[in-house]
Every structure is written in structure tokens, then in C-alpha cells.
Image (cartoon, rainbow, N blue to C red):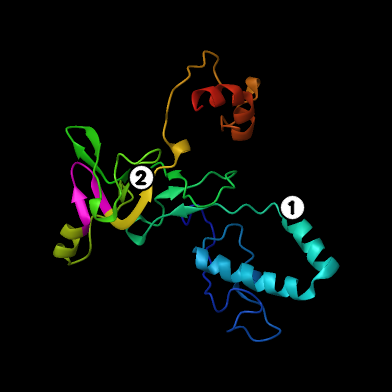
Amino acid sequence: MVAAGVAIGYGSPLTLTDTSNKIKKGTKGDASVLSPTVMAAVPAILDRVRDGVRKKVDAKGGLSKKLFDAAYGRRFAPVVQGYGLTETCAGGTFSDYDDTSVGRVGAPVPCSYVKVHIRLEHFWYQLIDWPEGGYLVTDSPMPRGEIIIGGPNVTPGYFKSEEKTKEVYKVKGISYLSVGKQARLDKFEIPAKIKLIPEPWTPETGLVTAALKLKREVTRKAYADDLAKLYA
């Protein structure tokens, strides 16, 4: 982003909005000054903003509340979820732009290998149980275990801390970072079957744009019956 000339601004929980605790009355907060195109934040920050707005709306009640609720449902400001750490250069997983579901963090970013406690041995991936927490690879319908992230976006270790690096990083062809979090694979993220489509996806078919970018919603509708049969 920096190399492309994108401007980056930083805010804090106490100065984010015009009514934040550290903002002098009558002056603007970080969000108002920066007017960001995209804003990255941890859930706690967004929860704080939402709670502040909801309290004001609920206090007014009546028609104001109804109008706000109606407008909120048509806000056209997508919120996407992801997961990552400093050690993974922020991104590890990221949900699709049009995925409005909650409680999940999306698929791995292209440069990441995200495993649910998977070990690389002889080019085979093997799920490993986490018995201390009762998370087993045999859990049905969603295998569970400890999250491990690997790939070129993962740092090689901790600076001048060899013991900590050995404790957290596992290197077997690819450096894997044990993030110390537990998770599960959602059913829709586990390929069950494959359907071969003989027709190529081209702009003429309407399934991709002129830049060959997939039109996800159009594709879902076009193959709704096939997907229903595959994952029934």
C-alpha cells in the first residue's frame, strides 16, 4: 500500500470519533479528519463505536430510532473479518467482501498456509489432536485443533530470543507459527466434492468481469442447484 502511494493514518480508541474522551468539544476526531477509505480495527474498537451510537439512538427512541434502524440496514458499508498477528504481518485469514456472516474469520490470505494443528511430514498433512482442551481431529462435523500459520508472510522468529523462537516456531520446510489459539473448520470451508464445468468462465458468460475477476454472487446463483446437491 505504501509503495502504491496510499496515505495511512493512525488513530486511537480515545481520539477516534468527535465525541471520544480525549477530543476537545467542538473539534474533530481521527475518523473525521482522515476520512479513511478502509479502516482496520480490532473488534473491541468497533464494539465501542457501535455501543456509543446505539445509546444515543435508543435514548431518542420513537421515530428517530425507527429511521436510524431503517437507514442502518441500508448503509452499504461492508464490514469484513479477518485474523492475524504482528508475527504474520497482520493478515492470516480474511473473509470475502460480500460475506456478511459472523463468528468466523474467512479463508487464508494467498500467502498464508493456515492449518488446524497440521504437521508437515513427507509432503502429507496430518491433523494432530489437542487432547488437553478436548479438541480432536475426529470431531464431527467440524474438526478442531490449535491454529498454526505458515508462509512467506510469517516472520522468521523473535529478535535475539532463540528460546522463544524455538517454543513458538516450528520449521519443517515452511516456518509455522503456533499462535496459541484454538479453532475449528467450518463445514462450508471443507471441500466435499468437485464438479467439473466444461464451459470456460469468460466475460461473455457473465461469470467474470472484463478483468477476469470472479462475480461471486452471480456465480453462486448460476450454480445454486449444483452446490446444493454437492453439499447436501
Q: Residue furthest bottom?
A: 24
Q: Is residue 94 magenta?
A: no
Kind of residue sitting beneath label 1: Arg
Q: Along the horizontal axis of the image, is 33 left or right of 6?
A: right
Q: Residue furthest right?
A: 63
Image location (x, y in percent) of residue 67: 81, 62
* Residue drawn 77% across the image and 63% down it: 68
Q: Along the horizontal axis of the image, is 35 left or right of 74?
A: left
Local SS, label 2:
loop
Q: Is residue 53 above or below residue 24?
A: above
Q: Is residue 178 visible?
A: yes
Q: Which residue is mark 2?
A: 112
Dominant secondary structure, magenta: strand
For marks 1 and 2, give the CA distance: 34 Å
* Residue drawn 59% across the image and 47% down it: 100
Q: Is residue 197 above or below residue 162?
A: above
Q: Nearer the viewer, residue 29 or 198?
A: 198
Between discs 1 and 2, the one toward the N terminus: 1
* Residue drawn 57% across the image and 44% down it: 99
Q: Nearer the viewer, residue 72 or 23?
A: 72
Local SS, label 1:
loop
Q: Along the horizontal axis of the image, is 87 left or right of 18?
A: left
Task: Categorize mark 2 by other alpha carbons within 10 Å: few (<14), some (14-19), many (20+).
Answer: some
Q: Is residue 166 above or below residue 9?
A: above
Image location (x, y in percent) of residue 171: 18, 48
Kind of residue sitting beneath label 2: Ser
Range of residues picked out in magenta: 168-177
Q: Is residue 202 visible?
A: no
The numbered disc on residue 74 is 1
Q: Which of the 4 image quadrants contains residue 212?
A: top right
